[in-house]
Image (spheres, rainbow, N blue to C red):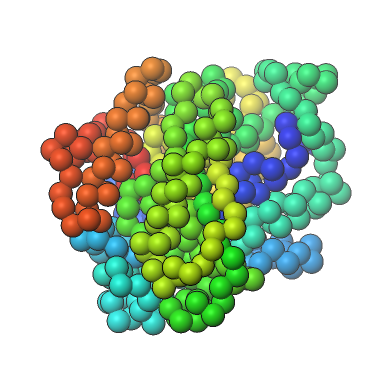
Amino acid sequence: MVVLEEGVCGHGPSGRNGGFIHGYWSHLTGLRERFGDDEARAVARAGEQIISGVRAFCEREGVDAWLREGGMLRVSAAPAQDPAVDEEVDAALELGVPKEAVPLMPDELAQRISSPVFRKGVFLRDAATVHPGRLALAARRAALDRVRLYEHTHVTGIDDGVVSTTRGRVRAKDVVVAVNAAAAGWRPLRRRITVFGSYVVLTEPVPELLEQIGWTGGEAVIDGRMFLHYFRTTNDGRVLMGSGSGPIGFGGKIDDRFWTDRPTVERAERGLRRLLPGLAEAKITHAWGGPIDVSSDHLPFFGTVPRTRIHYGAGYSGHGVGPSWLGGQILSRLVRGVEDELTRLPLVTRRVPKLPPEPFRRLGGGLVRASIMACEEAEEEGRKGSLAARAGASLPRLLGMSVGTR
């Protein structure tokens, strides 16, 4: 087996993300809307293997990847975000799995993490956090015992049975394309994914401040925005706050905006200061960002290019650490021609809605992004967004697509 990597394994989203690991019990609302109850339950059940699979890998390889199984909280920080919490609870109740989404009233939420802007929350047990860089490098070390790895190798062409690079060609019966955001420029997938930027800020170690706000259980946290804030603690007492509101790509091109977008960094820091004012004294020491591949329905998809042995996995939409483990199981089955409960999941069998062609995708996506951000900023300030902003924010749902978390 040969693995080709343009840079160094882990230098991209695999090693630079927020380090959330979860399956799909936290996606029940969207799964039901797209697939119905039975298929939603099947996807969520399959995702239950993710955290135990990562844990088993770390134990087998003797890796300390800072895995902490503290679950996840979705919190409402504005009245307009309340439905995002309530829908999680309702979906779990209606599917007969209430333990997967436990409602928390303000006083119960404050026992886990205290903030004057949190209105309510829901606890999702099927989640954990990890140090993504440590995990990615551990996977690289493990792979070196099993595959031939060629880093700093730029792929120039992918055809059935052969992959061309600037250093030569590789012939193989099966080819797997698993390149995250770079797949947005690959012809078979370019109408099904686009590229968004996501950025994080990281504080200095502040364990004493975390004690003061009661955030000591290791829970990952997300708010109810469409371009959500995602935040977690680290083993050395830091706080990471991310914002999924970065720039949108054009035609699959990944340029400097995805690595150096200062406005999105500033939005992430503003989110930290607003959501967790008890951490006002915590200094920001690091900030970084990068591109993510976002599918039109905000779920990953796997398959094989028709009439070829070229397989692919893409569209993780900012949730790749856990679902990529599941995707690995699916892709290995596609390569081996195995048909089972995983290859029958809608993550494999569904038809992913096509995105508009360029330049309409970029122009429309930019309009929707600006509209959603305007609405959510207004909501957090206690006012309603303008009619134009609300109309723009509603376009994706009218067209059967997802932007942000909905």
Q: Work out whether residue 267 or residue 96 is closer to the camera in this orientation and state it.
A: 267
The quarter of the picture where residue 264 lies is: top left
Q: Residue at x 73, y 25 (%)?
A: 154
When asked about the image quadrant of residue 363, the answer is top left
| Total numbered labels placed on residues in the image | 0
Identify the residue at the far left of this view: 387
Q: Residue 9: x, y in percent?
A: 73, 42
Placement of 259 over or under 223, stated as above or below: above
Q: 352 and 235: which one is in front?
A: 235
Q: Is residue 180 visible?
A: yes
Horizontal arrangement in the rendering, residue 241 relative to residue 334 (left or right): left
Could you tell me residue 59's position as x and y percent?
74, 68
Relative placement, left or right, of 353 versus 286 is left
Residue 27 spot, x, y in % from top left: 39, 55
Tell me where residue 137 appears, x and y as whole percent. 75, 52
In the rendered image, the vertical position of residue 26 relative to residue 257, given as above or below: below
Work out whether residue 107 or residue 170 is closer to the camera in this orientation and state it.
107
Q: Quick check: 373 above or below 151?
A: below
Residue 2 appears in the picture as rendered: no
Q: Report whether 253 appears left or right of 268.
A: right
Above or below 99: residue 382: above
Q: What residue appears at the point 77 percent right and 28 percent down from the top-left corner? A: 153
Q: Tell me the residue at 15%/49% (across/down).
A: 384
Quarter containing the N terminus: top right
